[in-house]
Amino acid sequence: MHQHIENFCNHIQHQKRYSNHTIIAYKNDLAQFQHYLINVYQINNLKEVKTTIIRSWIVELLQEGITPQSINRKISSLKSFYKYLLKNNIVEENPLLKITAPKSSKRLPVFVNEKEMNQLFTQVEFSNDFEGIRDRLIIELFYNCGIRLSELIHLSISDVDTYELTVKVIGKRNKERIIPITNAFKKNYTIYIEAREKTNPTTNYLFLTKNGKNIYEKLVYRMVNNYLSIVTTATKKSPHILRHTFATHMLNNGAELNTIKEILGHTNLSATQVYTHNTIEKLKEIYKQAHPRA
């Protein structure tokens, strides 16, 4: 069995569709399964592996406290392995056909609380040079509109309408949506545009580097991470966290779920409903603090 695992890993490595990290994960998962077969069932012949054996392995993993996400990855590794075995006539049956993966618990979106966001805009000093003005406006746009990093990168000057107080965003599958902006954002936007002109811009993209070139994702990610690190101890401090923060704060302050769905550009309401869990947690917290018998 060991040799078949080696051959399989060499096969997928030659396909050049997988990273080294993924190949190592495949190898570790399959080696773990082989160890289980030998030590529990004294089996080293793949043709002897039955569905019941794989199910018992999954149960043992769950009892060891392995998360459903990790177990699902191991099952996926095993499925790919058996697909290879069947194709090369090494086995005749696939024991994974009746295997159902354990359900993964939905991860609640990480977000920055309202007090910390308020500190960011009122107590953190942004420099008065071009980069400071730009950085503040970028963070405002993320927090006020909940847009994605890729959407922000591709915004043009013509996408912002200061008369109608809207910004036009092109999202996934080239789907266009119009998002409201505030008067406060308009004021800072006007200041930024004046600073932007002094960089001698060579493009119509809205956000630029100090040299007048189109801004890039790594720069924005690093900038957002640096500023959020000042006000929050959250483990994740990315532009996407500001998107989660926008949606959560909107819900906490009474916005309708369908409204948030449209602003975020979600196709299905189920994608937006994950934010209601954070709202429910806040309600529980308030209930425990306020109810005399809580």
Image (spheres, helix red, strand yellow):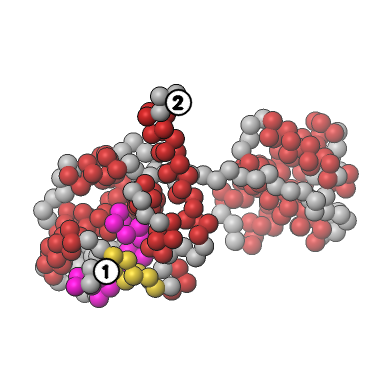
Furthest residue to the front?
A: 292
Q: Nearer the viewer, residue 215 or 243?
A: 243
Q: Which residues are magenta?
A: 142-163
The residue indicated by pointer 2 is 294
Which callout, 2 or 1, points at the residue further toward the start of the chain?
1
Give the class, few, some or many, for how many residues have Cα within 10 Å of label 1's Cα (few <14, many ≥20).
some
Q: What residue is shown at x 80% (from left), y 61% (from top)?
A: 87
Q: CA distance from mark 2 to mark 1?
A: 44 Å
In this view of the protein, can residue 213 be seen by the observer? no
Give coordinates of residue 63: x percent, y percent. Answer: 69, 30
Q: Is residue 229 left or right of residue 192?
A: right
Give the class, few, some or many, for how many residues have Cα within 10 Å of label 2's Cα (few <14, many ≥20).
few
On the rendered image, what quadrant is the N terminus found in? top right
Label 2 with label 1: CB-CB less than 8 Å: no
The residue indicated by pointer 1 is 166
Number of numbered markers = 2
Q: What residue is shown at x 27% (from left), y 40% (from top)?
A: 115
Does the magenta portion include 153?
Answer: yes
Q: What residue is shown at x 40% (from left), y 56% (from top)?
A: 256
In this view of the protein, can residue 250 be seen by the observer? yes
Q: Nearer the viewer, residue 168 or 152?
A: 168
Q: Amino acid at mark 2?
A: Ala
Q: Is residue 270 left or right of residue 6?
A: left
Does the magenta portion include 65?
Answer: no
Give coordinates of residue 233: x percent, y percent. Answer: 34, 36
Q: In the displayed structure, would residue 221 be above or below residue 43?
A: below
Q: Is residue 82 left or right of residue 196?
A: right
Q: Which mark is residue 144?
A: none
Give coordinates of residue 18: x percent, y percent. Answer: 59, 57
Q: What residue is shown at x 61% (from left), y 38% (from top)?
A: 67
On the rendered image, what quadrant is the C terminus found in? top left
